[in-house]
Image (spheres, rainbow, N blue to C red):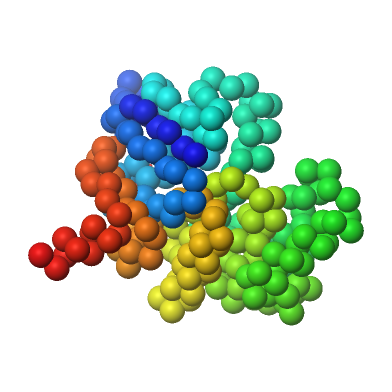
């Protein structure tokens, strides 16, 4: 589903430059649930922004669902972004004056889907995340965990090929974090390819594979089973 080869990215500020990604290689197969881990500044968000087609690498290649992403013009990139990718953010990014239902159905409006189908699809995904009864509530009337569930329903409603989650539990307490991760696991069990950026070990352990970044390079890339086995040696 994703093939990344020798990605490099630097930021330039005046005469200074910061080499943030220093040759990243990895593949993600359809149906995987992968976490990208690393301490602050290791390059996780930079990598996720590139994977999410919000930014471009300086060199290297990125193939998403057999499409080479590098050098696409903005219009085509936006089309692929909408078609292929769903995003989940730490701070939920919901529209505060719109109900849960409207938050979930709004992206479908921009895809040209008719009102009746938009509402049906949005309700279907709100049911899936356990929030059918909250569909007419505003985000301010929902808990953090419920807000993230709305955001997950919104991401799923467009049926993207890949879900990209940037610290999806970063604003949640421990119990709610585990509940949100269990929801993400359930979505993955149904076949969705999901990448989760996190700096928390216990969250990464709830995925199936952990890619560990340090100073812009991958220092480990193991399945969670391998990681657990090595902890008992
Ligand atoms: N737009 C930018 N311009 C200049 N420097 C940047 C920019 N974005 C990130 N950086 C720098 O690049 C490095 C990597 O940042 P990045 O946000 O990718 O790390 P991260 O692992 O996601 O960190 P965190 O967990 O704190 O979000 C940091 O030193 C950061 O200050």
Q: Quadrant of residue 26?
A: top left
Q: Position of residue 148 (x, y in %)?
A: 57, 66
The answer to whether 183 appears left or right of 128 in the picture is left
Looking at the image, which is closer to me, 93 or 223?
223
Q: Is residue 197 visible?
A: no
Q: Is residue 160 above or below residue 172?
A: above
Taking the spot 52% from the left edge, 25% from the top edge, the residue there is 68
Taking the spot 43% from the left edge, 79% from the top edge, the residue there is 175
Q: Position of residue 202 (x, y in %)?
A: 32, 67
Looking at the image, which is closer to me, 215 or 218?
218
The answer to whether 7 appears left or right of 185 in the picture is left
Q: Position of residue 110 (x, y in %)?
A: 79, 44
Q: Quadrant of the C terminus?
A: bottom left
Q: Position of residue 212 (x, y in %)?
A: 28, 48
Q: Is residue 128 above or below residue 159?
A: below
Q: Is residue 83 visible?
A: yes
Q: Quadrant of residue 105?
A: bottom right
Taking the spot 33% from the left edge, 33% from the top edge, the residue there is 25
Q: How many marks?
A: 0
Q: Is residue 173 above or below residue 230?
A: below
The answer to whether 91 appears left or right of 99 in the picture is left
Q: Quadrant of residue 138?
A: bottom right
Taking the spot 63% from the left edge, 34% from the top edge, the residue there is 80
Q: Is residue 38 above or below residue 96?
A: above
Looking at the image, which is closer to me, 192 or 200?
192
């Amino acid at each position: 589903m994703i093939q990344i080869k020798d990605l490099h990215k630097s930021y330039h500020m005046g005469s200074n430059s910061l080499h943030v990604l220093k040759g990243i290689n990895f593949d993600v197969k359809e149906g995987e649930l992968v976490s990208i881990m690393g301490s602050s500044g290791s390059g996780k968000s930079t990598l996720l922004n590139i994977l999410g087609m919000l930014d471009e690498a300086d060199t290297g290649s990125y193939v998403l669902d057999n499409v080479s992403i590098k050098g696409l013009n903005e219009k085509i990139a936006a089309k692929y972004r909408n078609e292929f990718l769903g995003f989940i953010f730490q701070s939920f990014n919901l529209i505060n004056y719109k109900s849960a239902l409207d938050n979930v159905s709004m992206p479908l409006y921009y895809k040209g889907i008719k009102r009746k189908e938009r509402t049906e699809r949005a309700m279907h995904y709100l049911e899936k995340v356990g929030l059918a009864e909250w569909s007419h509530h505003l985000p301010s009337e929902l808990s953090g965990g419920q807000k993230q569930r709305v955001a997950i329903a919104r991401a799923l409603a467009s049926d993207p090929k890949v879900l990209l989650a940037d610290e999806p539990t970063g604003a949640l307490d421990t119990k709610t974090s585990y509940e949100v991760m269990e929801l993400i696991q359930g979505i993955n069990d149904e076949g969705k390819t999901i990448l989760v950026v996190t700096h928390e070990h216990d969250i990464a352990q709830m995925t199936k594979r952990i890619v560990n970044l340090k100073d812009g390079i991958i220092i480990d890339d193991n399945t969670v089973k391998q990681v657990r086995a090595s902890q008992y040696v």
